[in-house]
Image (cartoon, helix red, strand yellow):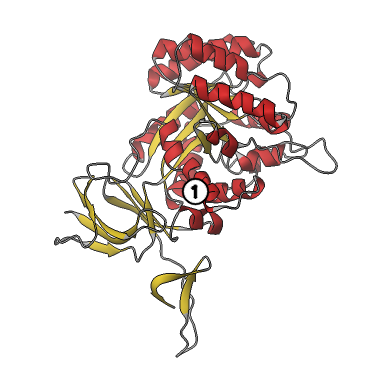
Amino acid sequence: MDFVLRNARIEAGGGLVDIGLAGGRIAAMEPGLRCEAPERDAEGRFVFPGFVDVHIHLDKACILDRCTVCEGTLSEAVRETARAKAAFTQDDVYRRAAGVVDMAILQGTLALRTFVEVDPRAGLRSLEAILRLKADTADAIDIEICAFAQEGLTQEPETGAMLAQALGLGADLVGGCPYTDPDPIAHVAGIFDLAERFGTGADFHVDFDLDPDGSALPAIIAETGRRRYGGRVSVGHATKLSAMAPEAAEAVGRRLADAGIALTVLPATDLFLTGRDRTRLVPRGVAPAHLMKRLGVTATIATNNVLNPFTPFGDASLIRMANLYANVAQLARDDEMEAVFAMVSCDAAKLMGRDDGLRVGGPADLVLLDATGPADAVRGIAQPLASWKTGRLVMERPAGTIHRAAGATRPRVAFGRAAEGFDA
């Protein structure tokens, strides 16, 4: 063994196991593992394969100082970001994106999908920066790049040619945004054409408003079926679902599940930008991911933006996003918390087609959380204490410590339950 993580809890309520790592894989997973190797005691805390952020924009993060946020609307965010990105340089994008990637690593994220805007204003500068960052950080985090048409396609044919160039340079998949295009249906078809041409997946920003009518999802569902693209298509936002009657939303969910289309909700952005026209009883504007999951949709939760006009706050913490979603969706039971945790971990890994799960022979990708299980983690926004990528320690930070008066002792409590074997 190269390393052993002892006394780890890999499922809520389960017994403790030792996890032995060798050659970048999990070599053993059993109680009382006997071997001579460097080790660490997890002390009964929860260990899992790491968070996966399936929807983030590294290229336009941390630009609040270059933008004006007055209305807090989607149209303003698109307009302000378009103005700012014309001045992006490769080094500027790399520096800002690297800062957010470091945030994500510290928050226990081991893989992410970033959208990178490619159009006449951004050129290929952002793509070149993120390709370089992807290579530079490959030992700590897996980065998947989606070449993205944020501002439309049909009215700007140069964008289509540039997306093709981006895919040729190494972008992993292609993304579209039908609601910013004067011809949303043609936009969807154009993105699918590129995906088919280069053999990649497709990911759409879609239905980002609170009008239940005029959805682009039927077109995406139809193209997915016609091209036999099930399992390779995902959609983000879909806030229209939150404005539909329950039976209508359920019908859409069943069609998404049947088509093999995954759904990602972005609670921080969706809460910030939607409902701005309301003066009271402002709607939440967050698609019901937990209900979609029950219908068989691969449903996930992600960050979207960090410190820009779309989301003027953020720290790349997926457990914080999970907690925010659970609060907004008014969830309470343990099984609901566990389902939400899956949306930022194993379900997100499934969306990206990753080899996920803790098993002997599997990748030695681990994150140690200061929690006793998934439900505790979501409820308490549990902090990651350490992470390993292919068996190498890539992140570590100490658990919080309370310094008590001399002679004072009391049991440590973890989210309302006495933690096993701890004294303060």
Residue 117 location (% of width, % of height): 54, 26
Identify the residue at image location x=51%, y=44%: 339
Above or below, comparing residue 282 to residue 212 in the picture: below
Residue 43 sits in which quadrant? Answer: bottom left
Above or below, comparing residue 371 to residue 118 in the picture: below
Is any part of residue 330 visible from this angle? yes
Residue that label 1 marks: 338
The answer to whether 98 appears left or right of 247 in the picture is left
The N terminus sits in image quarter: bottom left
The C terminus sits in image quarter: bottom left
The kind of residue tagged 1 is Glu
Identify the residue at image location x=40%, y=61%: 397
Pick the front one: 269 or 325: 325
Identify the residue at image location x=68%, y=25%: 248
Residue 374 location (% of width, % of height): 46, 53
Is any part of residue 308 visible from this angle? no
Q: Secondary structure at mark 1?
A: helix
Pick the front one: 411 or 184: 411
Residue 247 location (% of width, % of height): 68, 28
Residue 192 location (% of width, % of height): 50, 13
Identify the residue at image location x=64%, y=14%: 184
